[in-house]
Amino acid sequence: MKHHLHIRIGVTVAMIALIVAVVTSFFSYRFTHSQTLNNAKQTLSQLLSTVQRTASIAVFLDNKEIADEVITGLSNNDFVQAVSLTSVTGFKVTHGTFSENNNRSDLVTLQLESPFNPGEKIGELTILPNIKVIGQKARKNALIGVVVLAGFILLVAFIITQVVQVMFIFPLGQVATSLNTVLPGGDVFIPAPDKHKEDEIGNLVKYINNLLGMVKQELDTERRLREEIQGLEKRFRMIFERAGIGIFLIDQQGRLIMANPSFKRLIGPDLYEKIELHKDNCLDRIFKDADSIAGMLKEAILKNTSVSSDLLLHTTDENDVRWVNCLFTRVLDESGEALLGETLMQGIINDITDRKLREQLISFQAEHDPLTQLLNRRAAEQKVIAALKKAGDGDYCVALFLIDLDKFKPVNDTYGHDAGDKVLVEVARRLLLNLRHADIAARLGGDEFLVATIGKSTRAGTTLVAGKLLQNLREDITLPEGVVVNIGASIGISLSTIHGTDLAELLAKADRAMYQVKMAGRNGFCIHE
Amino acid sequence: MKIAHSFILLAVILLAPARVVTAETVIIVHPDNPVTSLNREQVVDIYMGRKLNFPGGNTALPIDLPPDSEVRSDFYRKLVDKSIAQINAYWARLLFTGRATPPRVLSSDTSILKSVRENRDAIAYIASENLDAKVKVVYRLK
C-alpha cells in the first residue's frame, strides 16, 4: 500500500483548509482592517458628539477653561493626534500639532452651533486622527483575526482528519484485512466492525458477504460440474485409450486428426511416425487396397451409414500378413450436421488376422489334399469347370493330364505307408516343377493325380508338357532310409479344343487314353484320339 | 364639596397656561439707561453670560426670578427654548471656570421693579401686566 488513505485525506483537507485559510485570511485581514479604521472614525465622531454641547458652550462664551477641558479630554484618546477648537470670533484653542503634510480628508470636523440659537454657526471642533496608531491597531486586530481564523480552520481540518481516521479508515482497514484472509469459495465470511453494523461500512460488508456467498455457490456448482465432466472425460478417455480396437479420426483428405494407442499398435509405431511426419492421406499408407478404401468412404458419405470391410495392412515384412476389419462412419453432431463444418470420418480397425488366417486355413484344408497339399478332387473339378467355362468363351485350351503311378503299390506294401506317403509328396513336388501358376495340380485319390494346363496349348505343346511330367516321374526317388525306388507313371491326356468342354467327358477320354498307355506297357503318355 | 374643588383645580390648570401664553414678557432697564432697545441676540448674550456689557459699553446686571417662577420658565422658553433645568445645568457647567456668573435672583416682580428703578445697570424681565412707568422696556418677548 503505497498511499495511506487517511494521510491523503489529511493532506487534502489540510491543503483545502490552507487555501481556505489563506483566502479567508486575506479577506478577513482586509475586512478587519477597514472595519477597525471605520470604527476608529466612528469612535472619533462619537467622541466629538459627546463633547459637542460643552464645546458649543466653550465657543459660545469663548471660554478657555471649558475649551481646554474639552480638548484635553479628547487628546487623551490614543486615536487623536491633535485637536483644535475654533470660534467665529477668532477664539482658538489647540492641542497637539497639525502639520502641513496632513491630508485634509483625514481631518474630522464638527460644526458647532450656538446652544441658544440653533442654526447659528459659531465655531468648529477639528480632530486630526492619529493615522499611525489607528493603522497599527487595525493591523493588529486584522492579524489576530487571521491567526484565530487560520488556527480554527487548521484545527477543524485536523479534527476532520482524525475523525475520518477513526470512523472510516480504521474500520475500512479492518474490513480490508478480513477480506484479505478470505479464500473464494471458502466458508469464511468477514465480520462487520463494531459500531458499523448499520451504516455504509456495514452495508459494504454485507454486500461483500453476499457476493462471497454467491461466488462460493457458483464455485461449488462449477466444481461439481467440473468433477462430473472430468469423470466422464476420464471414462471416455479410458474407453478411447484402453480400447482393444484402433479408433481414429480423419478428414475428407484422409489426413489423420487423432488416433488411440491401439491404432498405433495395430498399424505399427514406425508407420504411425511416418504418418505424423507427412500429414498426407494416411489411408494409402495404411491399407493395401486403396481403391476399396476410397469406395468405402464414398459410400459412407453418400448413404450416411457405416461401411465395413476386411482389409489388408501394409507391413514392413512382406510375409507378415495383417488383416483388419475396418469400419468407417461419418461424424455428425446431434442435429445431423457435419462437425465443425467439415466432413470428418471416424474409423475403427480391429485386428482379425488370426480369424482370417484360420478361415484361410480351413478353406485351404477343404480344397487340398492334406498329404501332398495339392488340390483334392472336388476343388480340382470346380477349378477345371471354371477354366473350361473360360476356355469355351475364348480361344483358350484346357489340357487334362490324368496321371496314375505305375509302381506305387509295391513301395507302399514293401516299405510301409510312411514310405508311400513320402513318395506321394515327392510326386506332387515334381508335378509342380513344370507347371505355371495358373495351372492346376490335384491328387484325385490313392496314387491317381490330375494336372490341367490352361493356355494356348497345341498338341505339340501338350506333348512337350506330358514329356516333361513323365520324365520327372521316371527319376528315382530316394527315401530317407536310403532306399531308392523308381515309380514311373501312365498319363492319359484330353484337350478341350478337341474333346469339348464337358469335364466328365474330358475325364472319361483322358482315362481311356491312360488305359491305353497301361495296356501298352505303362510308363508313357497318350492323347485321346 | 370635593367635586367643586376638583372643578376649581381643573379650571386653574386649564386657564393658567392661557394666561401665561397670552401674557407678554418684557425686558426692562433703568429709564436713564442709554440703551433704547435690544434685539433677541443681545438679550441672550447678556442673560447667558456671553456679554457682560450693554451694547453702549455700560456694565449689565441681569436679574432673574426665582427658579419656581412661571414667568422665569416662560422667559427662558421663549428666549432660548430651554427649560429651567437646562439653564441651571448650563450655569452649573460654567460655575467652576469662575469666568461667568448667573444673573442675580430676586424673589418677586415688585422687588425686581424696585431694583431696576434704583440701579442704572440693571436689566430684568417681568410680565407685561405688572409693568409700571418707572422703567424702560427695551425688548418685548413674544
Image: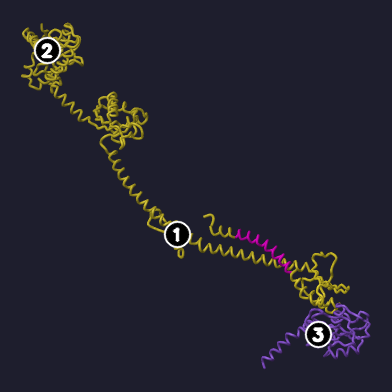
Chain colours: A yellow, B purple
Sooner in the amino-acid sequence: mark 2 or mark 1: 1
Residue with the mark numbered 3 = B72
Q: Chain of mark 1?
A: A
Depth check, front residue: A520 or A197:
A197
User: Residues in magenta?
Assistant: A14-40
- The amino acid sitting under disc 2 is Asp
Q: Chain of mark 2?
A: A
Residue holding disc 1: A203
Q: Which residue is mark 2?
A: A502
Whether the magenta-drawn stretch holds residue A24 is answered as: yes
Q: Residue A480 location in percent, x, y?
A: 13, 21
Residue A285's place in the image compared with B46, above or below, is above
Left or right relative to A320: residue A278: right
Residue A67 lies in quadrant: bottom right
Q: Are marks 1 and 3 in contact (CB under 8 Å)?
A: no
Task: Identify which residue is drawn at 84% across, 64% down.
Answer: A101
- Can you tell which quarter of the image residue A308 is in? top left
